[in-house]
Amino acid sequence: MRTKFYVWCMALFTLLGATACSDDDHPAHVSDKVKDTFAKDYPNAGRVEWSVKAGYNVADFYQDGVEMDVWYDKNAQWCMTETDLRRDLAQLPMAVQNAYQSSEYSSWTIDDIDKYECPDKVFYLIEIETKGKKDRNLFYSNSGQLLRDVEDKENDDVLPTISF
């Protein structure tokens, strides 16, 4: 009787574990067409890892020592590229540097900076933090215009459909 109970429990936990895993990170869902398009677009990409996020096929990779994510739709059309600029303000256009440095957040610590390129726009995200306050995400245009100032939340991926 005890053995049957343990077998039943193990089967139940295995089933729950398998269904609890998200398909969003399963590379088998990325079509060969998307992978071929990526290979043509980024022939020097290294350490490529595929996932599916919000219906987009996302390649996380390194090129020339820089971490990047590129987003494709299911038809292998490029939708967005995210480039990790680390914490280096000097990587930003001067207009964005000046806008941030003259903002109320200039004394905050920069946690990360990313550049986003979409078919119809380019923008920058500066993630900042300071002791005793909630982390912020600052979105800037190429010209240094603050597009959005929002509280940073867990798992708040920037999607190609973002609008300002």
Image (spheres, helix red, strand yellow):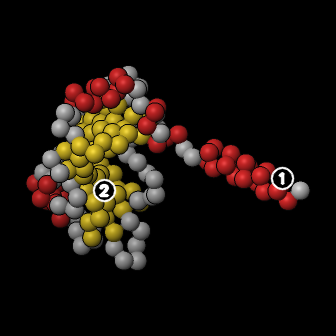
Q: Is residue 83 visible?
A: no
Give the distance between the C-alpha atoms of the residues marked 1 and 2, in whole angstroms.
56 Å
Q: Depth check: 8 or 149 in front?
A: 8
Q: Secondary structure at mark 2?
A: strand
Quadrant of the frame with the C terminus: top left
Q: Residue at x 46, y 32 (%)?
A: 29
Residue annotated with mark 2:
138
Q: Is residue 70 visible?
A: yes
Q: Residue furthest right?
A: 1
Q: Depth check: 120 or 103 in front?
A: 120
Q: Image height check: is 83 above or below 56? A: below
Q: Image height check: is 38 above or below 139? A: above
Q: Are marks 1 and 2 in contact (CB under 8 Å)?
A: no
Q: Depth check: 81 or 59 in front?
A: 59
Q: Residue at x 38, y 39 (%)?
A: 50
Residue annotated with mark 1:
4
Mark 2: which amino acid? Leu
Q: Earlier in the sequence, mark 1 or mark 2?
A: 1
Mark 1: which amino acid? Lys
Q: Residue furthest bottom?
A: 132
Q: Residues within 10 Å of mark 1 (few under 14, many from 20)?
A: few
Q: Image height check: is 60 above or below 77? A: below
Q: Secondary structure at mark 1?
A: helix
Q: Residue at x 33, y 36 (%)?
A: 71
Q: Quadrant of residue 149?
A: bottom left
